Amino acid sequence: MRRLHVLCEGQTEETVVREVLAPYFENAGAFVTCSIHKTRRPAGGPAQRGGLSGWNRIETEIRLLLRDSSITVLTTLFDYYGLPSDVPGMETRPAGSPYDRVTHVERAMAEAIGDSRFVPHLVLHEIEAWVLVGHAALGDLTGDAVLARDAQEIVSRAQGAEFVNDGFDTAPSKRIISLYPRYRKPPTARSSYRRSAWT
């Protein structure tokens, strides 16, 4: 069986892989595993996980994972929003659509690693864009039809959830929190993703 390994930015991404993506890919004949990026390895202590450090640490972890010959494909589940500036391609992003910029960075990351098994994926702009896509499920989860309508309006105004911009106060997560201050990434996102997945 083919094995897909996903290097995740944090706990929310790991939850999405385990509870939403893995069952989907396993039905298609792929075994899915995942791990959270290690941001620090303090001497004598456990590795710290979650968030992204600079490219040097990311690259080191990718290369270590690629030593595992049982991995058929290695990908990432990193937010484009807040991606470290030293990641390949970040300083040479073209003008144009957000899709063009993300594709440019993904290609540059793949070229820097130089292994055909590595197929990077960046979430435009952050994984909360997927919560906005599932605005109906978010409304069902919270029992708040107005929340669902307001989230849908954000998506409509931006002409798509992935076009909700990546400003500090206007990124998808900030928009969701402004509508629903009780939003907490792992539990709320997990339930919303599960309810809206593949519908």
Image: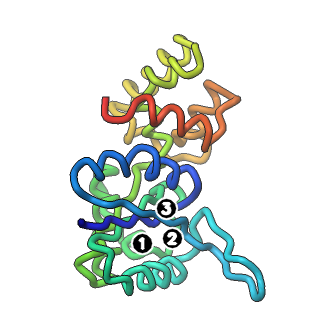
> Residue 8 — which label?
3
Residue indicated by mark 1: 91
Left or right, 152 with respect to 116, comes to right
Where is residue 181? Give x, y as percent.
69, 29
Mark 2: give few (<14), some (14-19) or many (20+) Cα within 10 Å: few
Where is residue 46? Give x, y as percent.
72, 77
Tell me what residue is drawn at x 54 percent, y 46 percent.
Answer: 167
Query: Closer to the camera: disc 2 or disc 1?
Result: 2
Three-letter amino acid code of the residue under disc 3: Cys
**Distance of label 3 from label 2 (alpha carbons):** 18 Å
Where is residue 140? Give x, y as percent.
51, 18
Which element type, helix, strand or loop, lies under badge 3?
strand
**Distance of label 1 from label 3 (alpha carbons):** 23 Å
Tell me what residue is drawn at x 50 percent, y 63 percent.
Answer: 83
- Asked if the residue at tag 1 contacts the one at tag 2, i.e. Cβ–Cβ closer than 8 Å, the answer is yes
Three-letter amino acid code of the residue under disc 1: Glu
Q: Which residue is outermost to the top?
A: 145
Three-letter amino acid code of the residue under disc 2: Ser
Image quadrant in which the C terminus is located: top left
